Amino acid sequence: MIGIRTSLPLPSLGEIVAQLFVYFIIEDYTNYWMHRFLHCKWGYEKIHWVHHEYTAPIGYAAPYAHWLEVLLLGIPSFLGPATAPGHMITFWLWIALRHIESIETHSGYDLPWTPTKFIPFYGGAEYHDYHHYVGGQSQSNFASVFTYCDYIYGTDKGYRYQKKVMKELKDGVKSTGLQNGGSHNSSLLREALHSHGVDESVITQVIVTRAEKDLKDIKKLYYKRNSETLDHAVAKET
């Protein structure tokens, strides 16, 4: 099969690591562009929308996709072994690692002790969660495994902006507290501040409570001033 050998001798550890590195790089780069294609109007409406039914994905959502998407995104996974064929053991290990990575990325858990934290430019669950959160309008975080393509081609700007705003918000909450959120929001904030670090989910609850109250008026005002919906403006920026 495409030059993959099954006989002895078995590959050395160095050979396995080198080939897996090549496979990951090839898969990541080609998957990035195929994923971008699936977010064009035709690709999303006809194919990719199925996968984005999960706005907050779980591990089982990793293979959940249109049958044509499964075929298309399978090409990058086999392109590496086809380009640089090795031993069947390396091929099996590659397929196993690729599935584990995909499940971890869609798990919704940014575990602090995962070994992937030590891999340079690794995206992970938090990175890919943003892509699903933005959904069909997303022009951010197309990366399959690593983040360098998004950085080079400027498709991580929305994510980096969101991270910057969240950091500023956390820093501001720590230093000043919430002044106008009411007694319930204040108690939530105190609970977050006295826990281990700042509980992002609690802070988010405080923010969303206020945001939901004002969002409708904000959208109306934005459209009145700019003759463009706020959703459309955000889609162009992210």
Image (cartoon, grey):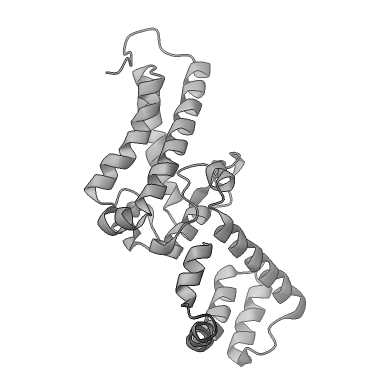
The single residue placed furthest to the right in the displayed view is: 175
Residue at image position (47%, 54%) is 128
Image height check: is 148 above or below 50? above
Judge by depth and name the residue closer to the eye, 81 or 97: 81
Residue at image position (63%, 67%) is 166
With 4 as the anchor, is 108 left or right in this view? right
Instruction: Place residue 70 in its image quadrant.
Output: top left
Residue at image position (58%, 89%) is 184
Residue at image position (53%, 52%) is 155
Judge by depth and name the residue closer to the eye, 16 or 219: 219
The single residue placed furthest to the left in the displayed view is: 67
Where residue 80 appears, x then y in whole percent? 40, 27
Judge by depth and name the residue closer to the eye, 210 or 44: 44
With 218 as the anchor, is 36 left or right in this view? left
Where residue 121 appears, x then y in whole percent? 59, 42
- Would residue 137 be seen by someone viewing this image from the given angle? yes
The single residue placed furthest to the front in the displayed view is: 227
Where residue 233 appears, x then y in whole percent? 50, 71
Image height check: is 34 above or below 4? below
Q: Quadrant of the N terminus?
A: top left
Where residue 204 appears, x then y in whole percent? 56, 74
- Would residue 196 be seen by someone viewing this image from the given angle? no
Instruction: Place residue 51 in its image quadrant.
Output: bottom left
With 238 as the anchor, is 83 left or right in this view? left
